Amino acid sequence: KGGLNGELGSLLRLTETGRWLVETGRGRTVAIRSENLWPAADEVPESFRRSVAAAVVVTAQLFLELARSGGTRQLTTSTVPLLLLAWTFGTLMGARWLYHPLISYQPPGLWDLGRAPPSQGLLRLGSAICALLLTCIVRIHQNLILKPVFTESLQFDAAMMCSEAGYIAALGLTFQSLFTYSSSPSSVSGLLRSLGVVSFFVGSAWHAKLFWQISPEFSHSSLAQSTIFSVIIAVRRLFIMCAPLVLPNAFLTVPVFRLQGLTGHSHTFRELMRSSSAVFQWVSMWYIMVYFSTYAVDFWIAFEY
């Protein structure tokens, strides 16, 4: 197809005539012979590949140092939550950049970024690393903060459940790294990916709820001697308290702005819901990852007291 030269598309299925049905970024579906297709992954700039490889090496070194020290080094331990935030940013922004030629509506949902290479590969890699980092954060938080503070407290069981909820969130990210976009939501892959999404959000919400419940106990611990620690606990509680206001409003942002600001252009209910869901996914993912990244302050201060 002369008019499609150089354009990125997503393979749908192989037809009986030996041609591939391809969905282009403009929403067109065309049948193209295999010899006229070129892997999109080959179009990724070499500098981008090297940047991702360097980030993986740095992260691997951190995991190795963490395993050697057993979480007893202040700088290494405190870096883990910040690295989670960095990988979240790099994965989502990088995947969106790679997926940009296929964008048919704004903004694309997080599920869309896993539809086809090369964004699919980066999303899988980033999700897997974020799952490992989140597991480490929950483990460190449990051993460094929760157990010393709540060992002799009536809230000990709630504190341990808080950690378990964090592990469920990490497991959800792992499922999302293994099972990305599926054209058939009812397929095994689609169901497992949906399970991962639900596990991540439910686990994160459960973790935050339990932390809200046990956080008053920190005022009686030695960590309360630090003003910065007391402030970060207050900020985190505010973060949790605002979640029921921020996340639902994020879902309503697109319909309000499009209905008020784009007069003369009609939007179907499906378009509005799709865009609203995409905004909700982006906001909620950032909200959760920023929340977990604040544990860097806790880890740093725990070594001081």
Image (cartoon, rainbow, N blue to C red):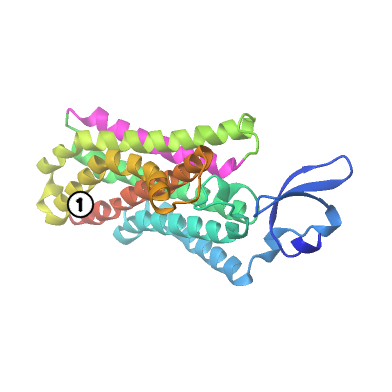
Q: Is residue 294 magenta?
A: no
Task: Write the residue at 54% across / 68% down.
Answer: 51
Q: Is residue 228 visible?
A: yes
Name which residue lies at 36% across and 38% down: 204
Q: Nearer the viewer, residue 222 or 263?
A: 263
Q: Nearer the viewer, residue 14 or 256?
A: 256
Quarter the N terminus occupies: bottom right
Pointer 1: what residue? 232
Q: Residue 152 at x, y = what percent?
A: 17, 32
Q: Report the span colored magenta.
A: 154-181
In the displayed structure, 251 sits above or below 50; it is above
Helix, strand or loop for disc 1: helix
Q: Is residue 115 left or right of residue 199?
A: right
92 to the left or right of 35: left
Would residue 163 be seen by someone viewing this image from the given angle?
no
Q: Is residue 72 left or right of residue 236?
A: right
**Residue at image coords 48%, 37%:** 197
Assess disc 1: are there few (<14), some (14-19) or many (≥20) residues with their C-alpha within 10 Å of its C-alpha.
some
Residue 162 to residue 119: above or below? above
The residue sitting at the bottom extreme is 47
Seen from the viewer's position, the closer of residues 44 and 13 is 13
Task: Give residue 20's position: percent from left, percent from top.
Answer: 80, 47
| Relative image position of residue 41 (x, y in whole percent) | 68, 60
Query: Would residue 156 be counted in the magenta stretch?
Result: yes
Q: Amino acid at mark 1?
A: Ile
Predominant SS along the magenta part: helix
